Amino acid sequence: QTEHFTKALYGLLDEAFDNVHGIFLDPGTSMFETLATISAAEASIPVGGKCATLAAQVKHVAFYLDVLEKSVRTQQFEPQDWGKIWRETTSATPEEWETLKTQLRASYDRLKALIHDTTEWPSEREIGGAIAAIVHTAYHLGEIRQALCCIK
């Protein structure tokens, strides 16, 4: 059963981040496909009166994946300042925007390595964390794509 679960996780994560398979996204709308269409200037525009920039959205997803990966590996689930990124990330130069996308890719790669290293899924906590990575990413991908409608 672990093999089936792991294969399904990889497929869903691949769809969310890289390659749409038609499971829950439309063609060309994965995270990295979407981010490739956004300039640093666009990533720095606050969307709406109280909304974060797209740069903050990307940084938040990377932070979330990093916290998830570290927590599962160490089995220490420490409180986090989830608001810090929203408060601190307001804009991005072209270099910073590229760095944010690279950091997201690295966080995603570490999550895939964690899944690869997981030989069994012993509890709801681990399974829930893996599923939450997909759901959380899909939520923010939706926010990013919705914001693009206002920006472009």
Image (cartoon, helix red, strand yellow):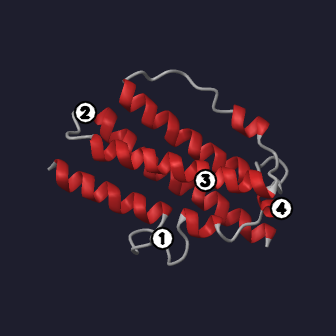
The residue singled out by tag 1 in the image is: 25
Query: Which of the pair 118/85 is nearer the observer?
Result: 118
| SS label for mark 3 | helix
The residue singled out by tag 2 in the image is: 123
The residue singled out by tag 3 in the image is: 102
Q: Residue drawn 57% across and 70% down?
A: 33
Q: Is the Cβ of the residue at disc 2 closer than 8 Å to that at disc 3?
A: no
Q: CA distance from mark 1 to mark 2?
A: 28 Å
The residue singled out by tag 4 in the image is: 41
- Image coordinates of residue 8 in percent, x first then y, are 28, 58
Q: CA distance from mark 3 to mark 1?
A: 22 Å
| SS label for mark 1 | loop
User: Of circles 1 and 4, which is in front?
Assistant: 4
Vertical comparison of 109 with 21: above or below = above
- Image coordinates of residue 118 in percent, x first then y, are 26, 40
Q: Few, some or many C-alpha atoms within 10 Å of disc 4 (few <14, some 14-19, many ≥20)?
A: some
Picture disc at residue 34: none
Q: Is residue 47 visible?
A: no
Q: Residue drawn 60% across and 48% down?
A: 103
Q: Is the Cβ of the residue at disc 1 closer than 8 Å to that at disc 2?
A: no
The kind of residue on which mark 3 rests is Thr
N-terminal label among 3 and 4: 4
Kindly indicate the quadrant of the structure image that contains residue 79. Answer: top right
Q: CA distance from mark 4 to mark 2?
A: 43 Å
